[in-house]
Image: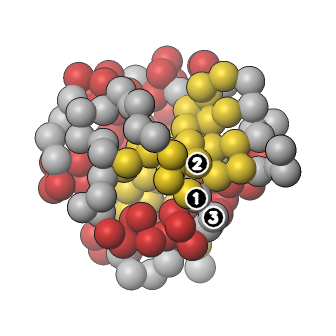
Amino acid sequence: MITMLEYTSFHQPWFEKLNRHWIEQYFWMEPIDVAVLQDPESHIINKGGAILMASMDDEIAGTVALKYVEPGVYEFTKMAVDEKFQGQKVGLALAEAAIEKAKRLGAKKIILYSSTKLIPALSLYRKLGFFEIPVDGPYKRSDIKMQLNLVNV
């Protein structure tokens, strides 16, 4: 069973470890990654965002963040699942919980930046209703931007 936990400073080491491992497995750490992973409270929480931690069998299995962009808009970011728990629907559970959290925070839409080489992630995002929009992101490794509308505009 997957349990969602609200992030506390106690979770910072897992937030950093899971994301650092994932980023370094596929890409490289950018200065913005280092800053956010080492101090998520300043970069995400204190600016109106949220972080969720997934737990399975009393272990941290994964994480996802919602970064506040502007009124009604959040960025879906820093999602990572521990290799030990991959293939157990943790990513889906995190994504669905993040969408519900964004709604509670007043989001009208969620954006995300990714890479076209991450086929399973893009498949998950499309399954959840995200669609491609023009890229304009802060990450050098991103070559795709997607959006999920949470209300009919």
Foreground pick, 59 / 34: 34
- 3 vs 63, left or right, is right
Q: Do the residues under discs 2 and 1 have CB atoms within 8 angstroms?
A: yes
- The residue under label 2 is 147
Q: Is residue 150 visible?
A: yes
Q: Residues within 10 Å of mark 2 (few under 14, many from 20)?
A: many
Q: Secondary structure at mark 1?
A: loop
Point 56% across, 57% down: residue: 131
Mark 2 vs mark 1, CA separation in Å = 5 Å
87 vs 48: above or below: below
Foreground pick, 139 / 26: 139
- Return the x and y of residue 91 as percentages of the image width and height: 48, 67
- Return the x and y of residue 108 as percentages of the image width and height: 77, 40
- The residue under label 3 is 129
Specify the farthest residue to the right: 152
- 79 vs 76, left or right, is left
76 vs 139: above or below: below
Point 17% across, 55% down: residue: 26
Q: Do the residues under discs 3 and 1 have CB atoms within 8 angstroms?
A: yes
Sequence order check, earlier mark of 3 and 2: 3
Say which quarter of the image contains residue 48.
Answer: top right
- Return the x and y of residue 10 as percentages of the image width and height: 48, 38
- The residue under label 1 is 130
Q: Secondary structure at mark 3?
A: loop
Sequence order check, earlier mark of 2 and 1: 1
Identified by mark 1, the residue type is: Phe
Q: Secondary structure at mark 2?
A: strand
Identified by mark 3, the residue type is: Gly
Identified by mark 2, the residue type is: Gln
Q: If the image is split into quadrants, where does the C terminus sit? A: top right
